Image: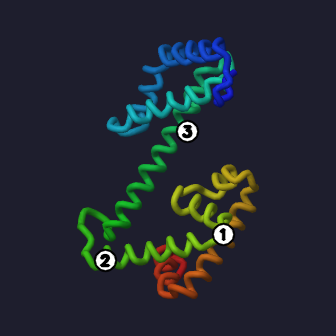
């Protein structure tokens, strides 16, 4: 089928469009109900749009007779990504606010945390790409060891080992430039 580089034939485009239209018409309401049960109503239309954007991009990989399961798999993955994004957003909001709950952070707390976060990001930016990648997958994308392993195409033990080593190198870098930051991060993670 289509390879995504504009070399598809007119028949392939037509059959892809027809298949997409058929899948959309047949399963849209069913997938919508699936999404409504799993995400906030305010997010359902965004999730549905992303589901069908993925379906369009991957239309050539659907197996005849397994379309329904394929669509549900895509919807499930989009929803999981949305959940992770929501979780990251909430953690970031709480971190920016500086205090749990509805109380706004004091200005000096915000300034101190912002300076700490900037120092941490500068240290991460100075690290080798391999370390930056695994640290970001863990800290920013909130992926587990097995998920990191899958993304990087390595074993779970290799992912855990690489993450551990990258954290040690980051701590060593921070200890040279920002020693108090290492202790503060360790306290937050419960390792101090």
What residue appears at the point 41 percent right and 33 percent down from the top-left corner? 37
| Residue pointed to by mark 3 | 77
Mark in front: 1 vs 3: 1
Residues at discs 3 and 2 in contact (Cβ within 8 Å): no
User: Can you say whether 72 is above or below 177 in the image?
Assistant: above
What residue appears at the point 53 percent right and 56 percent down from the top-left corner? 141
Badge 3 crowding class, 10 Å Cα cut-off, few under 14, some 14 to 19, many 20 or more, is: few
Q: Position of residue 88 (x, y in %)?
A: 44, 56
Left or right: residue 45 compared with residue 12 = left
User: Can you say whether 106 is above or below 2 in the image?
Assistant: below
Badge 1 crowding class, 10 Å Cα cut-off, few under 14, some 14 to 19, many 20 or more, is: few
Mark in front: 3 vs 2: 2
Q: Quadrant of residue 74?
A: top right
Left or right: residue 177 compared with residue 159 = left
Q: Position of residue 153 (x, y in %)?
A: 73, 51
User: Can you say whether 125 is above or below 21 in the image?
Assistant: below
Q: How is the image coloured?
A: rainbow
Marks 1 and 3, the one that precedes in the sequence:
3
Marks 1 and 2, the one that precedes in the sequence:
2
Left or right: residue 93 compared with residue 157 = left
Q: Quadrant of residue 14?
A: top right
Residues at discs 1 and 3 in contact (Cβ within 8 Å): no
Q: Position of residue 121 (x, y in %)?
A: 50, 71
Q: Position of residue 132 (x, y in %)?
A: 61, 65
Q: Label 1 vs label 2: CA separation?
A: 31 Å
Name of the residue lying farthest toward the front:
7
Q: Label 1 vs label 3: CA separation?
A: 30 Å
| Residue pointed to by mark 1 | 128
Circle 3 sits in a helix, a strand or a loop, which is it?
Answer: helix
Residue 109: numbered disc: 2
The one of 87 and 119 positioned closer to us in this rendering: 119
Marks 3 and 2, the one that precedes in the sequence:
3
């Amino acid at each position: 089928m289509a390879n995504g580089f504009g070399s598809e034939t007119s028949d392939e485009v037509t059959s892809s469009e027809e298949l997409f239209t058929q899948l959309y018409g047949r399963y849209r309401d069913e997938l919508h109900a699936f999404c409504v049960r799993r995400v906030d109503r305010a997010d359902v239309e965004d999730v549905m749009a992303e589901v069908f954007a993925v379906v369009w991009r991957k239309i050539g990989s659907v197996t005849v007779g397994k379309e329904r399961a394929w669509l549900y798999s895509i919807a499930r993955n989009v929803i999981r990504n949305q959940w992770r994004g929501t979780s990251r957003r909430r953690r970031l909001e709480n971190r920016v606010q500086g205090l749990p709950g509805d109380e706004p952070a004091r200005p000096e707390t915000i300034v101190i945390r912002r300076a700490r976060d900037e120092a941490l990001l500068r240290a991460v930016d100075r690290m080798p790409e391999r370390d930056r990648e695994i640290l970001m997958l863990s800290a920013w994308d909130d992926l587990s060891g097995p998920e990191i392993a899958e993304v990087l195409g390595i074993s779970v033990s290799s992912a855990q080992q690489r993450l551990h080593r990258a954290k040690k190198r980051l701590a060593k870098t921070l200890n040279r430039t920002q020693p108090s930051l290492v202790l503060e991060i360790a306290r937050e993670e419960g390792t101090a």
